[in-house]
Image (cartoon, grey):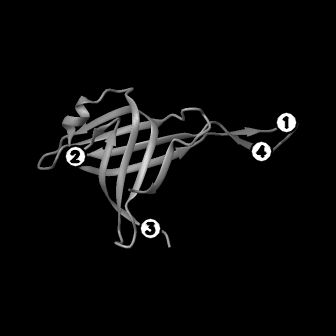
Amino acid sequence: MAGRYLSIKTAAFAGIDLPLPVSLRLGRTAQPQPASADSDIYVTSVELDSHRLTAELSIRDTSIAEALTLGQAGQLTCTIAPASSSLADRAVTLSGAVLVSIELSYQQSAMATATLRFVAEAADGAQDPFSAEEAE
């Protein structure tokens, strides 16, 4: 049975606590590159370029986000609470995360939010910078 996880308990980037996390979205993409010989009418195979891992974290504290710097690198970690008490919290880690975007949103009669976007770099090009495991 797959576990469902409903809320983010904690978030941190490069050793800095990111208070009041709202949402976390992770994406893994690669661009397909069709490969075929000049005499082929149809593509005979598809190769993928290097994989890119992105993360988007929204928090309700813009003062912390205002202090961050684009290009700042570090480990992004989040602890996610399960929907069921029979499951353990989940620790999601993105090693080598680089902050590439900060968006601040101020709305009438609502808490201000900051959306932080990251791209992950593999330290050696071979190991996956993403990991998820039971939280300690």
Q: Is residue 31 left or right of residue 112?
A: right
Secondary structure type for disc 4: strand
Residue behind mark 1: 37
Secondary element at tag 2:
loop
- Position above or below: 2 against 7: below
The amino acid on which the numbered mark 3 sits, given as a three-letter code, is Gly
Q: Circles 4 and 1: CB distance less than 8 Å?
A: no
What count of labels does the image hold? Answer: 4
Residue 30 x, y percent position in the rendering: 59, 41
Residue 93, placed above or below residue 33? below
In the rendered structure, which amino acid carries the disc numbered 2? Answer: Arg
Between disc 2 and disc 4, the foreground one is 2
In the image, taking residue 44 as reference, residue 66 lies left or right, namely left
**In percent of the image, x 49 and y 49: which residue is there?**
131
Q: Position of residue 110 (x, y in %)?
A: 15, 49
What type is the residue that disc 1 sits on?
Ala
The mark found on residue 3 in the picture is 3
Q: Residue at x 16, y 47 (%)?
A: 111
**Residue 45 has which mark?**
4
Secondary element at image label 1? loop
Q: Residues within 10 Å of mark 2 (few under 14, many from 20)?
A: many
Task: Tell whether 69 sits left or right of 127.
Answer: left
Determine the CA span between mark 4 and mark 1. 10 Å
Tag 3: Cα neighbours inside 10 Å, few (<14), some, or many (≥20)? few
Between marks 2 and 1, how big is the CA–CA gap?
Answer: 53 Å
Q: CA distance from mark 1 to mark 3?
A: 46 Å
